[in-house]
Image (cartoon, rainbow, N blue to C red):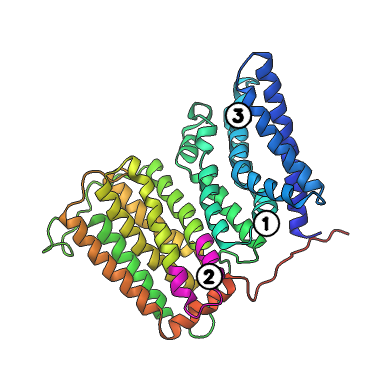
Amino acid sequence: MSGRDYLHIWYIAQSAVILFLLLLIAAWEAYYGIRLVMVVIPVALIMLLAIVSATLPQLPHWLQLINRWLQAVCQPFILAIVWGMVTRILIARLQLPARGIVALGMLYYIVMFAPFASEIGGQFQWAVSRICYLFWWLSCISTMGVGLPMKFAGPHTFVVLISTGAVAAIAYFVMVTTVMRSWKLSWPGIKPQFGWGFSWWVLITLVLVDVLFTIWNAYGAGDSWKNMFFSYDFHGIRPTGTLTMQAFEAGVAEETLCRFGILGCALYAFRRFENRIPYAVLLSSALFGLIHYTNLAEQTFSLTTVQVLSAFAMGLFFCVVYLYTGQLWITMLMHFLIDWTSFTISGSAVMSGQAGAMDWITLAVQMVVFVGVTIWMMFGNRRHVMKRHADRLIGEDQRFGFRLQFN
């Protein structure tokens, strides 16, 4: 049996357990006259359809199509909410120790979406649908903190891991890794395969650019254009567990979405284009920038726009670093350090105030540096190395269909 066969069995078993739990919850609510039962029943029908479609492959095409889109939209959210409800019941109703239940629950949450990613996510073939659902699945998995109120989370460390989205980010990474293999695209980089044309000096240059920008972005005074490169303030650094995990969540989740998922899908979609690398890099970076407009709920429009353009420029840089090294963990680390230094010096993950003249000037400097580095990477041996890694990222020179044999 192949690894996908085992994920198929896991998917059916997990769906059956979720359906059983939903029926129990519906019976409990009906007994106590809670109107929420009218919501639980349709959800249970969706999970029933998931089981039927997975066990009876000869269903009509139209029903398979409905099931595919219905499960893609609803099932990740259902899994997250039911996980939270069951965890609360075990703690509140059965009086089981919160520390142990939540610890086990977090461990299972990390892998809970993998069978869904293989069974349902693997059915999507169009690049647009893949990219759209990568966004949607991230928002569903991030509801972990909603499904489990913090008063049930147990120790403060667990509260931080859940409320900041750190555990959800790891779960999303596992899910996207699974679905990317189902799409026959790539691993996120495990063993470096640099090969011909790779230069350690180029890698050192990229790392140096990142380190200098990280220091300048977080600690540069930036109060006037005259001393924006020469005045630094290292006082007032306030690292906390919450800020560290918020930076971790951003580094893991956003790099998984934009560099691993979207860039991989874009490279595959543009595989017949001569300039597929620039096209894919621009698309991934543009989407990476635009998702920061979700911060408008807590930030002003002008400052958020600066953040969006800044993220676009950083996205270009992270893309060429990932394509040149083939290692996602490097861009995750870079992303984490940029956010962590910014969060700990400001004491918040949210930007406050209106964008001023110096904000736009520093943005212009950042755009020049990162766009310049990106253009530089598109020529010479650097481009050949990125092309070789791009070929690997869209599935070429990789082995699929791993099988487990038991005697």
* Residue type marked 3: Met
Q: Nearer the viewer, residue 269 or 24?
A: 269
Residue 267, which numbered label?
Answer: 2
- Asked whether the viewer can see residue 76, the reply is yes
* Residue type marked 1: Gln
Q: Nearer the viewer, residue 349 or 330?
A: 349
Would you identify the image quadrant in which residue 90 lies? top right
- What's the residue at 36%, 42% (across, down)? 240
Residue 280 among those drawn in magenta = yes
Residue 263 among those drawn in magenta = yes
Residue 128 at what x, y percent from top left? 54, 59
Whole-number angstrom distance, CA of label 1 to CA of label 2? 19 Å
Instruction: Tell which circle, 3 or 1, labels the residue nearer the N-terminal end.
Output: 3
Few, some or many residues within 10 Å of mark 1 (<14, 14–19, 20+):
some
Residues drawn in magenta: 261-281
Instruction: Tell which circle, 1 or 2, labels the residue nearer the N-terminal end.
Output: 1
Q: Nearer the viewer, residue 308 or 35?
A: 35
- Asked whether the viewer can see residue 222, the reply is no
- What's the residue at 38%, 46% (across, down)? 294
Residue at the outermost top position: 32
Q: Is residue 85 left or right of residue 244?
A: right
Residue 174, which numbered label?
Answer: none
Q: According to the image, label 1 marks what residue?
A: 123
Residue 155 at what x, y percent from top left? 50, 31
Q: According to the image, label 3 marks what residue?
A: 85
Type of secondary structure dominating the magenta stretch:
helix
Tell me if residue 60 comes above or below residue 382 in the rendering.
above
